[in-house]
């Protein structure tokens, strides 16, 4: 998802079909965190817009209040971080396996069947 800040609050609000004041409320509650310019203007990224659309679906379609939305968003963030960690660990594991395979010796070794041990008879 594109994380580059691009849209001022009025444009972001229009793109997601919300009032700018609603976006400010969501920011105050910590549900969305737009970047700020040096002049303190809010700039929303595509990722922020997707998050706002998700909040909108959770409140309108599922009827969640903002406390419920906060829990869902926190769990989704945790799940995303877990997936990222899992992907990173799988990538590291594949690299380690490749390194082990590179260390294999590829010498030819002749096989000799073991000779039977002579048994003593009395």
Image (cartoon, rainbow, N blue to C red):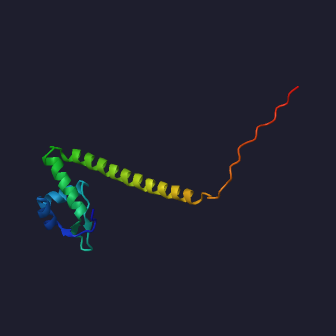
Q: Position of 112 compared to 22: left or right?
A: right
State the image coordinates of residue 37 (x, y, percent, origin top left): 26, 72
Q: Residue furthest bottom?
A: 38
In the image, taking residue 80 as reference, residue 120 lies left or right, namely right
Q: Position of residue 114 (x, y in %)?
A: 73, 42
Q: Is residue 116 above or below residue 47?
A: above
Of 93 and 47, which appears nearest the observer?
A: 93
Q: Nearer the viewer, residue 62 or 88?
A: 88
Total marks shown come to 0
Q: Nearer the viewer, residue 11 or 96?
A: 96
Question: Quarter of the image holding residue 51?
Answer: bottom left
Q: Nearer the viewer, residue 46 or 87?
A: 87
Question: Residue at coordinates 22% horizontally, 70% vertically from top-left?
Answer: 6
Q: Which residue is found at the position 24% from the left and 57% from the top?
A: 32
Residue 75, above or below 102: above
Q: Residue furthest top?
A: 122
Q: In the picture, which quadrant includes the N terminus?
A: bottom left
**Percent from the top left, x then y, of residue 122?**
88, 25
Identified at 47% across, 56% down, the residue is 94
Q: Position of residue 82 (x, y in %)?
A: 38, 50
């Amino acid at each position: 998802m594109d994380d580059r800040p691009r849209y001022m609050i009025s444009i972001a609000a229009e793109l997601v079909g919300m009032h700018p004041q609603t976006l400010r409320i969501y920011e105050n509650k910590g549900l969305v965190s737009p970047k700020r310019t040096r002049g303190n203007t809010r700039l929303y990224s595509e990722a922020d817009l997707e998050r706002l659309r998700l909040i909108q679906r959770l409140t309108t379609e599922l009827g969640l209040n903002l406390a419920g939305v906060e829990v869902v968003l926190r769990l989704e963030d945790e799940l995303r971080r877990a997936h990222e960690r899992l992907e990173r660990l799988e990538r590291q594991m594949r690299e380690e396996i490749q390194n082990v395979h590179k260390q294999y010796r590829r010498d030819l070794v002749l096989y000799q069947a073991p000779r039977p041990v002579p048994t003593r008879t009395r």
